[in-house]
Structure formats: C-alpha cells, structure tokens
Image (spheres, rainbow, N blue to C red):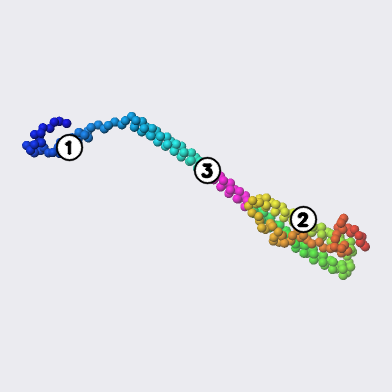
Amino acid sequence: MAHVPIAWCSGDFPSCKPWAFTKTFGSQNRLSKPSKTSPTKQSEWNKTHRKCLKILDEAEDDKERLSNLVAQERQQSQQAAQQHRTEKAQLSTQIQHLVADRKQAMEECERVRTENLQLQSRLETATSNANSLNQWPQADMETFLGMIHGDLSTTAARIWGRRDELRNSYLATFSDVLQPPYLQNSGPMGEMGNQVFPSAPLPGTNGAFPSTNPLVPSSGPNA
C-alpha cells in the first residue's frame, strides 16, 4: 500500500476522509491469495471421494440385481397363475363329467327301482294266480323266480360297480380338496344300501334258493 502523507488527512484537504484508509486496507486484504490446502487434508478428501464412488457403484449393482430378481419373480408368478387357471379349467371339466355321470347313474338307479317294483307286482300276481288256480307247477315257479332273482342281482351288481367307479374317480381327483357329501351313503342311492333288492322266498324252498343251480330245484315233489 502506498504511503499516504499525513497532510492529506488534515483539514487542508476536504476530500480526505477517515474511512478512505480503511477501505484501501480492506481492498488489499480481499485481493490477497487464499492459503493452500495441506497435503494430508487433500489425501483424506481423495479417499473419501473414492469411498463415495465405490458405495455408489455397489448401490447401482444392488439395484440392478434386485431389478432382475423382481422381474424373475414376476415371471414365475405369471407362469404359476397361468398354470393355476389351466388346472382350474381341467378340474371344472372333470367336475362336469362327474356330475353328468352321477346324474346318469341316478337315472339308471331310478329306472331299476321302477323295474323292481313292476317285477314284484308281477311276482305277487303270478303267485296269487298259482295259489288260487293251481296253474303253475312248482318247477316252473322256481325257474321263473330264479330268473328274476338272477336278473335283479346282475343289475344291482352293475349299478353298485358303477357307483364305486364314480366314487374312486372323484376321490382320486379331489382327495386333497374336499370330501363330497353326495358320494357318501346319503340320498336315493345311500338310502337303498347294498341290499338294493330283497330276496323273495321261493315256494317250497323254505326261503332259500338251491345251493347248486337256482334254475333247477334240488329236491321237491315235482323235481
């Protein structure tokens, strides 16, 4: 800073003010160069900067890895949902088939029950006529009853075999889902039971058929 004569600051020079020296001194301080950073602090700053860059790189890698994982999980979820829809459609089709088979079996069972009632009515009529008019020989009556019993037994065995097939097919498909109440011993088929056709005693046989051949009597006056 240049030397300022004292005379300049005297009253002889009205333009000389006390703050002029202070302003000049402050300007000189602002123009001075800042002090340089020490090498130790510069090294620490570089280390911190490298650590920050490393953390950012790791965060970017984690983000990419998580994005891939989310995409993979989403794809697997979509595949599982599609498989579930396909299996649901297949099970619905199987249920419809089973319901149709059950309905058909119930209709067949009802038809057989009607035939059974008709045969019982015919049997009662034939027995009444034979007893009143004595038109039917013992052998013919036993033969007729044996034929009726054989037909009814065959029909009953076929119906219950079909019922068991439907039960096994349904339980094999839905054993881990539910136990269908209508396949248990309930409803018209459950009420009938295994003994769907009661055996009618033959005249002269003490309520039992011959053990060897039901169509040929083993003993009797007309054998």
- Amino acid type of the residue tagged 2 in the rendering: Ala
Apparent side of residue 216 relative to residue 56 in the rendered image (left or right): right
Name the N-terminal-most of marks 2 and 1: 1
Residue beneath the point at 57% across and 46% down: 80
Residue beneath the point at 26% across and 32% down: 34
Quarter in which the C terminus is drawn: bottom right
Name the N-terminal-most of marks 3 and 1: 1
Where are the magenta residues, as a range? 74-93
Apparent side of residue 140 relative to residue 42 in the rendered image (left or right): right
Measured Cα–Cα span from mark 2 to mark 3: 54 Å
> Mark 1, residues whose alpha carbon is within 10 Å: few (<14), some, or many (≥20)?
few
Q: Which mark is residue 32?
A: none
Q: Where is residue 99 in the image (x, y as percent from the top left)?
A: 66, 56
Residue that carries the numbered disc 2 in the rendered image: 157
Q: Where is residue 167 in the image (x, y as percent from the top left)?
A: 70, 54
Q: Is the magenta stretch mostly helix, strand or loop?
A: helix
Q: Is residue 90 visible?
A: yes
- Amino acid type of the residue tagged 1 in the rendering: Lys
Residue that carries the numbered disc 1 in the rendered image: 23
For numbered disc 1, what is the local secondary structure?
helix
Apparent side of residue 170 relative to residue 10 in the rendered image (left or right): right
